[in-house]
Amino acid sequence: VQLQASGGGLAQAGGSLRLSCAASGRTFSSISMGWFRQAPGKEREFVAAISRSGGSTVYADSVKGRFTISRDNAENTVYLQMNSLEPEDTAVYYCAANLYYSDSYNYPKEYVYDYWGQGTQVTVSS
């Protein structure tokens, strides 16, 4: 599975960005997808995940109510709509593919993801 993330950039606090992650190499509807991020000097952390059909989503508490994950299986793409951005959201954002773990309680765990994209930088200025 190849993953290509895009859409990062510079935003002001309170602004919005939308990240995209295009997948190839496997039937997209058979893959659960997640977004993680890593800020400078910090460990990578879970942001959001979505089930194969899109019917189930999971969010980190820090982004709940501000970020929305969605997917378009016809376009083989997963999205992360980020609203009300805060400087603390500054990080490199990674999309990841989970081929085998279908229960949503597993989605925040890094080890369930088999493939990772290259990352896209998001910088939020105050």
Image (spheres, rainbow, N blue to C red):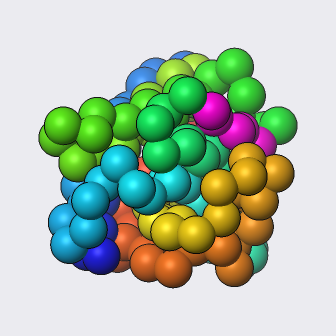
From what the image shows, is residue 84 above or below residue 26? above
Answer with the quarter of the image where residue 74 lies: top left
Q: Position of residue 72 (x, y in %)?
A: 28, 34
Q: Is residue 59 magenta?
A: yes
Q: Locate residue 67 relative to residue 122 in the image: left or right.
A: right
Report the side of 24 relative to 72 (left or right): left
Specify the segment rendered in magenta.
56-60
Q: Is residue 53 left or right of residue 65?
A: left
Task: Give residue 7's position: percent from left, percent from top.
Answer: 27, 46
> Which part of the image, by quadrant, shows the C terminus?
top right
What residue sits 30% from the left and 76% below the top? 1
Please tell me whether residue 110 belongs to the stretch shown in magenta.
no
Question: Picture coordinates of residue 78 (x, y %)?
Answer: 36, 44
Residue drawn at 50 percent across, 69 percent down: 99
The answer, for residue 80, to whether it is visible in the render is yes
Coordinates of residue 96 in the picture (x, y in percent): 47, 66
Label total for image: 0
Q: Is residue 82 left or right of residue 120?
A: right
Tell me the residue at 47%/45% (across/down).
Answer: 52
The residue drawn where x is 49% and y is 54% is 33
Seen from the viewer's position, the closer of residues 49 and 8 is 49
Q: Quadrant of residue 26?
A: bottom left
Q: Is residue 14 above or below residue 104?
A: above
Q: Main secondary structure of the magenta part?
A: strand
Does any portion of residue 89 appear in the rendered image?
A: no
